[in-house]
Image (cartoon, rainbow, N blue to C red):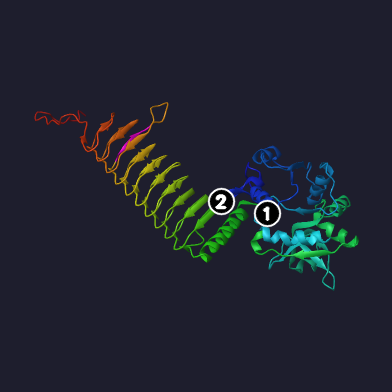
Amino acid sequence: MHSSLPKVLQPLAGKSLLGHVIARANSLQPQRMSIVHGHGAETVRAAFAAEQCDWILQSPPQGTGDAVKQVFVQTPQQPEKNEVMLVLYGDVPLLQTETLRPLIALAQQGSLALLTQHLSDPTGYGRIIRNAEGAIQGVIEHKDATPEQRTITEINTGILCAPAAKLSQWVRQLQNNNAQKEFYLTDTAALAVADGVKVEASAPQYEWEAQGINDQIQLASLERQWQHHLAHQLMAQGVAIADPSRIDVRAGQLIAEREVRIDVGCIFEGEVHLGEGVVIEAHCVLKDCQIGRHTRIKAFSHIENATIGEENHIGPYARIRPGTVTHAQVHVGNFVEVKNSEIGLASKANHLSYLGDTTVGSEVNVGAGVITCNYDGADKHRTVIGDRAFIGSDTQLVAPVTVGAGATIAAGTTLVSDAPAEQLTLSRTPQRSLSRWKRPVKTK
């Protein structure tokens, strides 16, 4: 990967490769999980310290068969009679739960179950060897295959499930008589046949599911395939996506109701809920937020950990930060930042303002360049703006401060004390014009 970050910690769709694999394993509710690791062991373990699993160190690395063998050697629990083991790979991140269930079912019936698929270009993959009757006899790795065997298009993905007690015996019998001098897990297929155990195959739902990652090119390619898949799922539900190749859904779930429209270049992270009729314009980033019905998020806006009400207009170039709640018909305009604030019904802040730790009532107008000075260098303080207040442009509201309902704050005011309701409050020095003043002239 040409990276100091271990391969299994490289990100895909906002989650590490191994994070995807662990999540998929957990979706199957396993009795226990073992993670065999080698390169970057301490970094990998630290990234998943909260996982309930056995950590198995393979040192030195001697192939996939040896990796599985180490599970049995280093784990104190012995396989139970009816227990099956599913083997997944840390760099094959996108296997779907419904693809893995048939493998488990076959193993529970006593078979060795392999996940196989047909590829138009099988170069580099192990080939499935079948007899004249079509029964699987074994797997031959590409480097060890004859020219005739390399014409086989059915390949072994490496994913398998087997009766655990049998698999424990087979991996102990493996030999490294091959081009790479490694213990191949795939050789268990021939051992199973010799042991009278049926070897059966199951195929993934999608061709991209079993793709592994070996470099940044493959990582980027799989990212696009996965995002395209997610986009198609959304479009099948009625979401209008301007270009399914230019959308990213990362590490969570995007829920979209009827008549939602999403323009190009948008990123959705965590849990995002888009209400009916929501429009997301180009190049917006939404993270862990809820957007109310018929709201328009204009281009280049960022929203994080916020709840946006119905019929809002947000942006362009707005930044809505954590803890913000807006009610219906709110306008937050271009280059406006809002943090940990509540904005009431039909209130507007249309230009170049900062509202931090602020409670804004209904039908309030916040002029251009208004700043809530919420931080005194040690603590945050709150500003309260009553219903129907008018805050003139270039006003600084020095918290803690309250603006009464219906109050008007003149442009250019620095408000350091509460402003009474229904009154004009201003702080200005008298304006003067000096008739004898001369503009300085350069001396050189």
Q: Nearer the viewer, residue 32 or 248?
A: 32
83 w.r.t. 355: above or below: below
User: What numbered label is drawn on residue 284?
Assistant: none
| Disc 2 target residue | 252
Task: Measuring from the top left, give residue 116's x and y in whole percent.
Answer: 74, 63
* Residue 176 appearing in the image: no
The answer for how far apart the CA atoms under marks 1 and 2 are is: 19 Å
**Per the image, is 370 magenta?**
yes
* Residue 43 shown left or right of residue 238 in the figure: right
Q: Residue at x 73, y 53 (%)?
A: 88
Amino acid type assigned to the residue bearing label 1 in the image? Val
On the image, the x and y values in percent for residue 192 come to 87, 60
Depth check, front residue: 374 or 59:
374
Q: Where does the magenta region start and end?
A: 369-374
Q: How busy is the neighbourhood of tag 2: few (under 14 within 10 Å), some, or many (20 plus)? A: some
| Residue at the top extreme, as displayed | 378
Residue closest to the far right: 195
Query: Does residue 262 appear to the left or right of 109 in the view shown?
Result: left
Q: Quadrant of the C terminus?
A: top left
**Circle number at residue 92:** 1
Q: Tell me the element at label 1.
A: loop
Q: Secondary structure at mark 2?
A: strand
